């Protein structure tokens, strides 16, 4: 079992970076990933850190884009309110909220699975992300 400079196993530190992503600690995830990239030498561990941060960013971007749709509808409604009217597309807003809830579930399940697999220095394939991470380490 390979050890890190902290004295813990490589798999445990890899799992930690995914579990920080699971619990939503963006600052903690970035800090532990930065530590791994700067101080550790294990290639699998570095790839795991980059994968965790990349996944966290992708999920945050998708959530932000989805959240932008109700914001636009609310802005248009505010303009209509100035003139005594109203503008609502509740069907579209409800679909967006359902998609965001589904995205949150997928994110949590993926980070949990990645964290559990990392304990044995394994991974769960995420096609687009894995390709990007591999390209980064060429």
Image (spheres, rainbow, N blue to C red):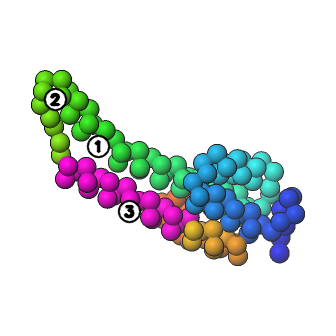
Residue 80 — which label?
A: 2
Any magenta on residue 60?
no
Which secondary structure, mark 3? helix
Residue 90 versus residue 117: which sits nearer the camera? Answer: 90
- Sequence-first disc among 1 and 3: 1
User: Could you tell me if residue 37 is visible in this image?
Assistant: no
Callout 1: 10 Å neighbours few (<14), some, many (20+)? some
Q: Tell me the residue at 13%/23% (across/down).
A: 83
Residue extending furthest toward the top: 82
Residue 86 versus residue 59: which sits nearer the camera? Answer: 86
Where's the N terminus, which quadrant? bottom right
Q: Which residue is mark 1?
A: 70
Figure check: 50 above or below 79: below
Q: Tell me the residue at 23%/30% (across/down).
A: 78
Q: Nearer the viewer, mark 1 or mark 2?
A: 2
First to last magenta residue range = 90-111
User: Could you tell me if residue 97 is visible in this image?
Assistant: yes
Q: Position of residue 118 (x, y in %)?
A: 67, 70
Where's the C terminus, which quadrant? bottom right
Callout 2: 10 Å neighbours few (<14), some, many (20+)? few
Which secondary structure, mark 1? helix
């Amino acid at each position: 079992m390979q050890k890190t400079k902290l004295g813990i196993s490589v798999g445990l530190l890899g799992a930690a970076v995914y579990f920080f992503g699971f619990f939503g600690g963006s600052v903690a995830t970035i800090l532990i990933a930065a530590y791994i990239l700067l101080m550790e030498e294990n290639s699998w561990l570095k790839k795991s850190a980059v994968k965790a941060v990349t996944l966290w960013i992708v999920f945050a971007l998708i959530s932000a884009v989805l959240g932008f749709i109700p914001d636009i509808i609310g802005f248009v409604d505010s303009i209509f309110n100035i003139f005594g009217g109203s503008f609502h597309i509740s069907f579209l807003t409800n679909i967006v909220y359902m998609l965001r809830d589904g995205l949150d579930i997928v994110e949590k399940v993926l980070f949990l699975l990645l964290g559990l697999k990392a304990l044995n220095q394994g991974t769960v394939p995420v096609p687009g992300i894995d390709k990007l991470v591999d390209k980064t380490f060429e």
